[in-house]
Image (cartoon, rainbow, N blue to C red):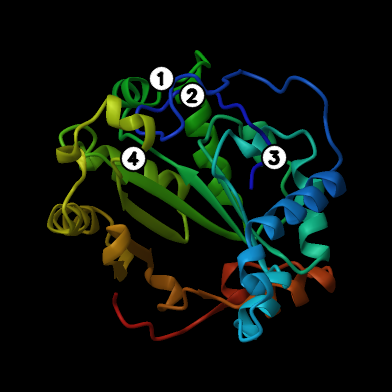
Amino acid sequence: MTTSMFCASRCKFCWRGQKAPVSEEWYGPIDSPEHIINYSIEEHLKLLTGFDGMGVENTNKTAREERDNIKHVALSLTGEPITYPHINEILQAFHKRRISTFLVTNAQYPEQMEKIENVTQLYLSIDAPNKTLLKQIDNPLLPDFWERTLQSLDLLKTRTYRTCIRLTLIKNENMTDLEGYANLIRKGSPDVIELKSYVWVGSSQKIYKVENMPFIEDMENFTNQLLELLPEYEFIKTHLPSRAILLAKKSLDKKVWINFPKFFELIENNQKFNTEDYSSPIIIPNV
């Protein structure tokens, strides 16, 4: 789900298209966190009514039970969710329901980042290694977009909850200047790095070609070169269907699995904690 329909960028690789609403700041009414959560869950469950089997008796009982037990929320999908004025309050409200939170932001609102006390994982989308390419790819509205990006990275480094920098890689456009990427990643010092292939879907098909999607071999080659510049990180896993690769700090000792019960225990006991406190080792076969 998302807490905002507008964004401060018109990223060329976005599936939403160039007619999606944009704004430098919040506008319009401000719904309460509980209102947003309740209606999001209601609409989500409507989408999954098929698990009821339309009267068929032998439907999957486990799937029906899981449908009603919502455990995770990704504040992403469309718009820039962090612009919601009550972003910290809605995260707290989700946690009270024991729903984990994954928040994605395009690093344009550091003042909103500062509000966030706890989130299960905070993603910063870094779509280019330098100012020139970022302007070309993201088409930001804010004139000080680069300064905001750098400020967001500085803040990311100070967060104690789990952090991630996501690189959406576009062949023949932003798979360059690895030194630039490495410098930005060191500045933000995220716990994990997600390298994800651009996907030729939605309105981005009007701008790019299918050839702009990197093959997994391209992704692996880029990753290996990046790791040479970031010896403090190591390869964790490749997910072939997504053409995505996960890296993590060596200091985590491969403990990259989120222990959700532990996360909520720390929240409920009002304890100070860091990423390691709710991270666990797990062996996952490559897909």
Residue placed furthest toward the top: 143
| Residue 32 left/right relative to 173 | right
Residue placed furthest toward the front: 55
Q: Which residue is mark 2?
A: 9
Q: Which residue is mark 4?
A: 201
Marks 2 and 3 in Cβ contact (< 8 Å): no
Marks 1 and 2 in Cβ contact (< 8 Å): yes
**Residue sitting at x 30%, y 45%:** 199
Q: Residue 171: name its quadrant.
A: top left
Q: Amino acid at mark 1?
A: Asn
Q: Earlier in the sequence, mark 2 or mark 4?
A: 2
Q: Nearer the viewer, mark 3 or mark 4?
A: 4
Q: Nearer the viewer, mark 1 or mark 4?
A: 4
Residue 173 in picture, x, y percent from top left:
20, 32
Q: Earlier in the sequence, mark 1 or mark 4?
A: 1
Residue 34 in picture, x, y percent from top left:
86, 49
Q: Which residue is mark 1?
A: 139
Pick whichever, 36 or 158, lies toward us: 36
Real-space Cα separation, disc 1 to disc 4, in angstroms: 19 Å
**Residue sitting at x 41%, y 49%:** 166
| Residue 218 left/right relative to 204 | left
Q: Which residue is mark 3?
A: 3
Real-space Cα separation, disc 1 to disc 2, in angstroms: 6 Å
**Vertical position of residue 44 compared to residue 138: above or below:** below
User: Does dot 1 land on a helix, a strand or a loop?
Assistant: loop
Q: Nearer the viewer, mark 3 or mark 1?
A: 3
Real-space Cα separation, disc 3 to disc 4, in angstroms: 23 Å
Q: Amino acid at mark 4?
A: Val
Q: Earlier in the sequence, mark 1 or mark 2?
A: 2
Q: Is residue 117 visible?
A: no
